[in-house]
Amino acid sequence: MEIATWIIVCITLLLIVDFSIGRKRHLAQLNKQRFPERKSQLAVFTTGPDLFEDYFAELRQAKKHIHVLFYIVKDDSFGNEFLEILMQKAKQGVEVRLLVDWVGGSLSRKTKQKLKQAGVEFASSQVPKLPFLFYSSQVRNHRKITIIDGAIGYTGGYNVGKEYINKDKKLTPWRDYHLKVKGEGVQDLQKQFLLDWKRTMKVNLLQKEVYFPPLQQGEIRHQLLPSEGNELEQTLFSMIQKAEHKMMIGTPYFIPSDRIFNELLKAVERGVQLTLLVPFTADHILVKEASLRYIRKLISSGGNVYQYKKGFYHSKVFVIDDKLCDLGTANFDKRSMFLNLELNCLIYNQEFIQQVNMILQEDLRDSDEVSLEELNRFNPFRSLKERAAQTVSYFL
């Protein structure tokens, strides 16, 4: 028994040292990328069937190159339909590159071989590496980016798998927000994909003009913001400080850093109306329990919290004063703030923000408000799970 305890202590210490030094190295080597404000045409999709009908149609129309990055591509019937389109385009002579996160991707060796045989360049992003194996295994590429012929782009919350088109009984219908981009902003999606491709494959394609065709200016002012390390926390902090009247947060996981949570409470104290929308049904163990201590305090301080009841809510959106909308891949949690590679889009167009607000109001109608009485009701099993969640909240 003493030997087993000693082994556990040693392994724990090694993991702590690995994570601590690995994180310091990561922060010291951050590849900070800032894109300017652009003007594009933006469309928002909120259901998987609508999104992927449009997305697959655009993929099939590709003439020159397709660049795709997803956190998750599943080896199920829907994932195979997606991969079949990519293979068909590659066989037609279209350049196709597919980058999938090492943890999120579940493609078999056989499927990867089929992709390569068809001419698709495939790579796994963020493969864990020595000497900091534990830390590097936690840094996930959570971005979702597609660029077609350098002229059409997509980014947002959707991945590729049957649950995203409402084929999973527990998580149906799946509610998410995803952007389609035409115009100036596509060049920044292209650049970010090529930066991530370079990071993975050590191949620099950024100077190839063929990937950056001339683009027309659109009507919607926006800015794409890639983040990793601690950049997202600073962005959110600055946004919260600017809030004057109201804030609306939609997220599947509400596990903010102490700095961000305290700033949210300060905003409520100065009279800002804060509304938080989270799912009632959880898709991962302990994520719901990890959020409860924040939700209790938020409600006690005057915030309003709603749980989405019409399926699973996976949207990532933050609207401030009807003047700024943040929509992208990042969740409102510590993992997105400190570990993941993310990509958000700040949108400044009031007409588009009004459209997002209408979507949010629809989602609120499909939700129930959370009360302190309900959260404080005696539930020993929930309390036990909450304590467990607090110890690992950084990694959820």
Image: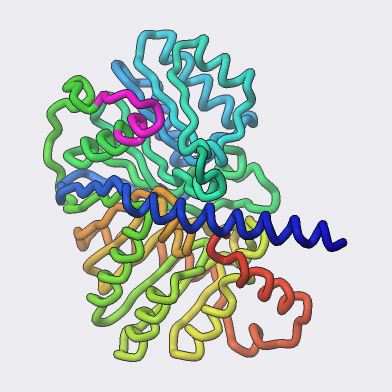
* Residue 36 sits inside the magenta stretch: no
Between 242 and 10, which is closer to the camera in this rendering?
10
Task: Determine whether 306 is above or below 299 in the image.
Answer: above
Task: Point out the image quarter for the C terminus.
Answer: bottom right
Q: Main secondary structure of the magenta part?
A: helix
Please provide the residue range marked out in magenta.
Answer: 195-205
Give percent across and percent down for residue 364: 48, 70
Task: Determine whether 86 is above or below 132 in the image.
Answer: above
Between 332 and 358, which is closer to the camera in this rendering?
332
Identify the residue at image location x=44%, y=9%.
Answer: 91
Task: Point out the image quarter for the N terminus.
Answer: bottom right
Can residue 328 be seen at all in this image of the molecule?
no
Give percent across and percent down for residue 213: 16, 26
Identify the residue at image location x=61%, y=72%.
Answer: 390
| Display coloring | rainbow
Can residue 17 be seen at all in this image of the molecule?
yes
Direction from residue 109 to residue 337 in the image, left or right: left
